Image (cartoon, helix red, strand yellow):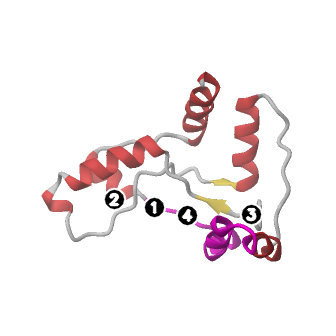
């Protein structure tokens, strides 16, 4: 929201579900810190939007919101108000390293391009 040039890791939801099941059913995984499997080829917000727009076949039109804009909208919508505390994820690079998980479970995270394509395909099918 605040900066389209910062890198931001996202985890593909089906990967997160599989990871949760694997971790929950692996005794040796207990009492450790894990990052869910996330593509290491992290995108900027701009790159992410461009990929999504390309999949939908539309131009990548967007605007960058300033913090005060989000805070102002939060005065009228409690969901947005809750998002304000998460804005730090947009101010600087927010990158996960899931190599520990990938190695432990021989898991290859879904790439951003594949995850976006599959998500758009599912959205169009509805």
- Image x and y of residue 48, in percent: 69, 47
Q: Are marks 2 and 3 in contact (CB under 8 Å)?
A: no
Q: Is residue 11 left or right of residue 45?
A: left
In the orientation shown, which residue stands out farthest toward the left?
27
Which residue occupies the foreground of this view, 41 or 6?
A: 6
The residue shown at (49%, 62%) is 96
Residue 95 magenta-highlighted:
yes
Q: Looking at the picture, does residue 20 appear above or below residue 109?
A: below
Give the spatial CA distance, label 1 vs label 3: 22 Å
Q: Is residue 85 left or right of residue 73?
A: left
* Range of residues picked out in magenta: 74-97
Q: Looking at the picture, does residue 76 appear above or below residue 107?
A: below
Residue designated by label 3 = 1
Give the spatial CA distance, label 2 vs label 3: 29 Å
Give the spatial CA distance, label 1 vs label 2: 8 Å
Residue designated by label 2 = 100
Disc 1 or 3, which lies upstream in sequence? 3
Q: Secondary structure at mark 1?
A: loop
Give the spatial CA distance, label 1 vs label 4: 7 Å
Q: Are marks 4 and 2 in contact (CB under 8 Å)?
A: no
Residue designated by label 1 = 97
């Amino acid at each position: 929201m605040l900066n389209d040039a910062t890198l931001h890791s996202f985890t593909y939801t089906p990967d997160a579900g599989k990871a949760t099941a694997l971790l929950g059913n692996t005794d040796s995984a207990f009492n450790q810190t894990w990052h869910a499997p996330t593509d290491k080829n992290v995108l900027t917000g701009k790159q992410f939007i461009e990929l999504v727009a390309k999949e939908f076949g539309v131009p990548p039109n967007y605007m960058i919101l300033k913090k005060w804009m989000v805070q102002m909208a939060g005065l009228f919508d409690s969901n947005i108000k809750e998002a304000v505390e998460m804005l730090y994820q947009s101010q600087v690079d927010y990158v996960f390293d899931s190599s520990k998980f990938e190695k432990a479970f021989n898991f290859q995270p879904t790439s951003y391009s594949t995850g976006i394509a599959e998500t758009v395909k599912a959205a169009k099918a509805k």
